[in-house]
Amino acid sequence: MKFEVKSGKFGYGKEPVIQDISFDVEDGQVLAILGSNGVGKTTLLKCMMGLLNWHEGHTEIDGIPMREMSSREIWKKIAYVPQSKGTALSYRALDMVLMGCSASLGLFEQPTEQEIETARKAMEEVGILHLQEKQCSRMSGGELQMVLIARALASKPKLLVLDEPESNLDFKNQLMILETVTRLARKQGIASIVNTHYPAHALKIADKALILYRDRNHSYGPAEKTITEGNMARAFSVDVKIGDFYYDDQCYKSVIPIRAF
């Protein structure tokens, strides 16, 4: 599948938020979106998925404008994981993940054993099968985030869209999310678009990067050529140093903030 935004523009009232943005992502690729708070990253995700209407430009899936597709067609291909902000719902984790199978069910259909097994496999994929009986209202923010990602995987998407998936997660769970996104891309060919505040995470998993700036301009291209010290300074008003760290003959990128300005 090829997912593409062409010349997208959006604003609230007279205030422009997104100006003339174009990018694409294909099967097996990961696109990281970076930028400071309030710059429009979540708005961009909503526009590109049709949750908000572009003022100009459009989104295409395999060359077909998304406005010409039904919601059912779109959500069979795309799964969205919003920012986790907690929930008071008393669903079991397994029931929450089962909701990801709803695209394949009719209005009054009940999930079959096959759908239940699909949900359990999705939970196992992100390492939370042990939480299947726990109520979401009693979970930590990190646990709930993992459940939402499993719910998205249960729909068997072609494109996974994640809005700050590392939020509220400790080091181990952050690493699990990054490894899951990479594994899905490399082994199953699932494309991902990931909003993140962590340039080092983007360098670890992304093939492409899109950086949004406060002046409503942007940079887009291969991750290692786009996530540079100069672009990070421009985006975050922070001097950074990007360097290589080698362990077991493998190169890891480190991004070290030096000072704010």
Image (cartoon, helix red, strand yellow):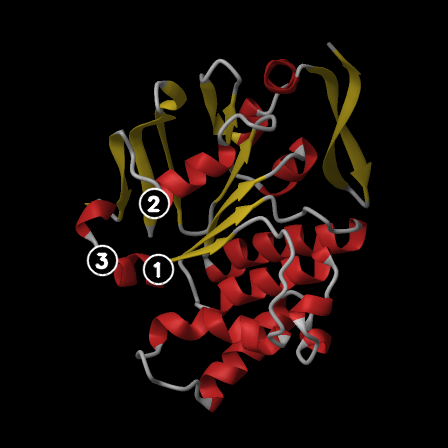
Mark number displayed over residue 3: 2
> Is residue 65 visible from the viewing direction of this image?
no
Question: Please, what is the three-letter code of the amino acid marked with disc 2?
Answer: Phe
Residue occupying image coordinates x 31% and y 78%: 107
Q: Earlier in the sequence, mark 3 or mark 1?
A: 3
- Is 209 positioned to the left or the right of 172 in the image? left
- Is 84 positioned to the left or the right of 209 in the image? right
Question: Please, what is the three-letter code of the amino acid marked with disc 1?
Answer: Trp
- Is 76 positioned to the left or the right of 150 in the image? left
The image quadrant of residue 132 is bottom right
- Is 120 positioned to the left or the right of 27 in the image? right
Residue 7 percent location from the top left of the image: 29, 27
Q: Which residue carries the number 1 mark?
A: 75
- Which of the two marks, 3 or 2, is nearer to us in this view? 3
Residue 146 percent location from the top left of the image: 65, 61
> Is residue 160 visible from the viewing direction of this image?
yes
Q: Which residue carries the number 3 mark?
A: 70
Secondary structure at numbered mark 3: loop
Residue occupying image coordinates x 36% and y 70%: 103
